[in-house]
């Protein structure tokens, strides 16, 4: 009994999620030891505002990447959502919640258009979503011109109910964004790992032809992954707008790289067929905590934060490439008999 | 008909025709656009994107991608202009910038070709790293007060309205194009992108070729960085941010296929001119340049979708033709019918 437990633990230790969890704990220990303030619940939970968008979106971009695609338009959809909420609420006088629904529908439509071109016209996902990122950020800018407010100022003065989305705290400590993130993680997990739909997504990534021949409507499923990622971007856009208190067309423009980094760091293969929601969620947290902890505890200028994140990505992927390399495995197996490559 | 078919095959010609069509159309609506000054400005202004697009075309032709060139441009621009600002010689500045570009390229090439890491992900990491280095190098401040002689270079005209910079870039592009299409080693690039496994089997050094492609890409990005600092006159730490996406878009507009092995450097440079002319064209048509991104996005999507649909159709057609020629006369008829439908 004890051995089987250890055996299972050993297996777990080789899984990528476990390594990510260790990195996350390590971050907490190092940052906490360096600056005890870091561990104060208010400080730590307050940091969630800056990273939550990336966490939310990367969950669903994982779906797209598992089918073998990529989505680099989500960042522009964040801005589009924000400005749609702002303009429909302020200038068209629509109820704020209806405005949110309109924004989500608009985002889903954007995702569906790109997904259609990828799935039904056979265009490379990278190119379509590159075009989409230009198109949707352009449309967002045009929509911002419809408003009476100057676009660089941003639309502000939202009703209290709307700003409550980001400022509400459960039991006075847990910010609502964390709850939203946790909820979406559970939904994404159930959808990807516990449902028929998820199995289909994986099958398309592993072998698209087999998926097609086994009678799956693979085109529709590929399209749906782009719709999902667009909707998640819309949710992130609404949360971010609520937190900032202003709607602007260009918020979120810098998110593309961190999102892809989180998905890849989470163990998703960019060639498709492999990946996990838990991995992505952990990786997004690792990046988020890193970006938050380094300036707080090591007084590193926020402008330099691209370096550690880039380095982390490079080290991890190089390490994983090496550990899958037969030569390295042979050498390592000679030194550590139990080493047999990192299985993620 | 055969001429049309040939045009479809030589992809850069169709993008050239598109460019002429676009300029002609704008000229019809506003004849001011067709003055030599305005036309040459379209080309002169595209010089940075031309170099970036041609550089990244090397990488794309081998079937990979590089999203770190924007940061590479920023770093080499910062390095060279700091040297110039502090009174260093021009030769040192250029060499330092080129060295930066080649090193970044070598780093990318090593990770992707030797370690076999997916290129998008590896260059994404490099992008973060190099962009961070720009901040470290400049201390987050702007590099300003470049020597007037250097910034004046950007406006020097060689003949008529043609700037020396664009003429130089054009020469570079033509030289690179000739190397790519006429020399043995140059042809390796397209071969590797077209059929990596086949290329390895016939003894082409796939790994070396890919590393070379990244080094060349970094080199072109660093030259673009020098021209950028001369044209703009100051360097912000975010200089070149997002340029990688525009360069990729330029390649796509110029008929370079992102799956590798298809396209040409001339096409990429034409795509860069289309790409950077859009905002100017909008002004001539009386629109605000706010439409810039929207038009670019629509153009990009329409072109790639049309291209993909046409290619798929051609592939289906050739398959049917092959099947028809293989089988007997009875099936041939049905094969033809299917191909026609």
Image (cartoon, coloured by chain):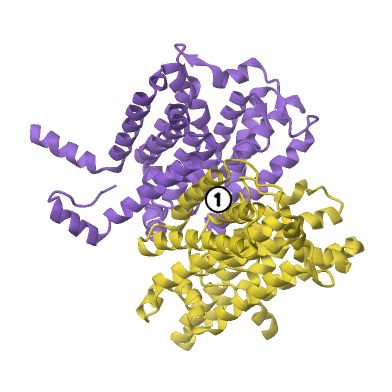
Q: Where is residue B273 in the image (x, y as percent from the top left)?
A: 72, 64
The quadrant of the image that shows the C terminus of chain B is bottom right
Residue that protrudes farthest toward the front in the picture: B87
* Residue A274 seen from this side: no
Density class for disc 1 (Cα within 10 Å; few <14, some 14-19, many ≥20) is many
The mark total stands at: 1
Q: Where is residue A136 in the image (x, y as percent from the top left)?
A: 65, 45
The residue at the point 61 percent across, 69 percent down is: B310
Chain (yellow): B
Residue B334 versus residue A79: which sits nearer the camera?
A79
SS under mark 1: helix
Q: Where is residue B240 in the image (x, y as percent from the top left)?
A: 62, 52
Residue that protrudes farthest toward the top in the picture: A171
Q: In this view, does A313 lie to the left or right of B93?
A: left
| Residue A256 sits above or below residue A181 on the image | below
**Mark 1 lies on residue:** A115
The residue at the point 76 percent across, 55 percent down is: B148
Chain (purple): A
Q: Position of residue A68 (x, y in %)?
A: 44, 54
């Amino acid at each position: 009994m004890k051995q089987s437990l250890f055996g299972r633990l050993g297996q777990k230790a080789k899984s990528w999620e476990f390594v990510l969890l260790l990195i996350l704990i390590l971050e907490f220990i190092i940052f906490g030891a360096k600056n005890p303030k870091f561990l104060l619940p208010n400080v730590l939970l307050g940091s969630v505002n800056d990273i939550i968008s990336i966490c939310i979106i990367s969950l669903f971009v994982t779906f797209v990447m598992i089918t073998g695609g990529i989505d680099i338009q989500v960042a522009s959809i964040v801005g589009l959502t924000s400005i749609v909420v702002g303009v429909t609420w302020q200038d068209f006088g629509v109820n704020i919640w209806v405005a949110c629904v309109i924004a989500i529908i608009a985002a889903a439509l954007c995702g569906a258009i790109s997904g259609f071109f990828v799935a039904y016209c056979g265009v490379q996902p990278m190119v379509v979503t590159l075009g989409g990122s230009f198109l949707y950020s352009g449309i967002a800018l045009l929509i911002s011109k419809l408003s009476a407010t100057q676009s660089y100022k941003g639309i502000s003065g939202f009703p209290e109910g709307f700003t409550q989305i980001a400022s509400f705290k459960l039991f006075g400590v847990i910010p609502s964004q964390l709850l939203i993130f946790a909820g979406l993680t559970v939904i994404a997990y159930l959808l990807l790992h516990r449902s028929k739909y998820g199995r289909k997504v994986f099958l398309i990534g592993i072998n698209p032809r087999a998926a097609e021949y086994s009678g799956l409507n693979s085109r529709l499923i590929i399209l749906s992954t782009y719709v999902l990622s667009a909707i998640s971007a819309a949710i992130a856009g609404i949360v971010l707008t609520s937190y900032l208190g202003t709607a602007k067309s260009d918020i979120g423009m810098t998110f593309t790289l961190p999102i892809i980094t989180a998905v890849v760091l989470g163990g998703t293969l960019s060639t498709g067929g492999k990946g996990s929601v838990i991995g992505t969620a952990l990786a997004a947290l690792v990046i988020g905590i890193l970006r938050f902890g380094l300036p707080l505890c090591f007084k590193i200028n926020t402008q330099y934060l691209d370096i550690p994140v880039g380095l982390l990505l490079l080290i991890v992927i190089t390490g994983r490439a090496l550990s899958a390399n037969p030569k390295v495995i042979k050498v390592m197996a000679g030194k550590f008999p139990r080493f047999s490559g990192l299985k993620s | 008909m055969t001429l049309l078919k040939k045009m479809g095959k030589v992809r850069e010609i169709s993008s050239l025709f598109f460019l002429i069509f676009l300029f002609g159309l704008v000229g019809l609506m506003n004849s001011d656009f067709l003055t030599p000054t305005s036309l040459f400005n379209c080309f002169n202004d595209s010089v940075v994107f031309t170099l970036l697009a041609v550089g990244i075309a090397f990488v794309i032709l081998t079937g990979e991608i590089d999203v770190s060139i924007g940061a590479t441009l920023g770093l080499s621009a910062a390095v060279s202009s700091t040297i110039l600002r502090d009174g260093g010689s021009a030769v040192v500045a250029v060499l330092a910038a080129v060295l930066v570009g080649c090193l970044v390229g070598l780093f990318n090439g090593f990770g992707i070709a030797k370690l076999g890491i997916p290129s998008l992900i590896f260059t994404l990491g490099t992008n973060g790293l190099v962009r961070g280095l720009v901040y470290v190098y400049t201390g987050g401040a702007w590099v300003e007060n470049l020597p007037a002689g250097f910034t004046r270079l950007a406006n020097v005209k060689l003949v008529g309205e043609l700037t020396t910079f664009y003429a130089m870039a054009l020469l570079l592009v033509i030289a690179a194009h000739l190397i790519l299409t006429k020399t043995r080693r140059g042809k390796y690039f397209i071969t590797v992108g077209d059929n990596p496994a086949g290329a390895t089997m016939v003894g082409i050094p796939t790994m070396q070729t890919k590393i070379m492609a990244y080094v060349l890409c970094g080199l072109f990005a660093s030259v673009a960085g020098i021209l950028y600092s001369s044209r703009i006159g100051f360097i912000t730490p975010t200089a070149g941010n997002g340029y990688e996406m525009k360069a990729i878009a330029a390649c796509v507009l110029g008929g370079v296929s992102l799956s590798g092995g298809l396209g040409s450097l001339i096409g990429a440079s034409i795509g860069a001119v289309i790409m950077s002319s859009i905002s100017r064209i909008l002004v001539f048509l009386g629109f605000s340049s706010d439409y810039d991104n929207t038009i670019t996005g629509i153009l990009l999507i329409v072109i790639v979708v049309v291209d993909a649909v046409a290619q798929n159709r051609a592939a289906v057609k050739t398959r049917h033709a092959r099947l028809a020629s293989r089988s007997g006369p009875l099936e041939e008829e049905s094969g033809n019918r299917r191909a026609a439908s």
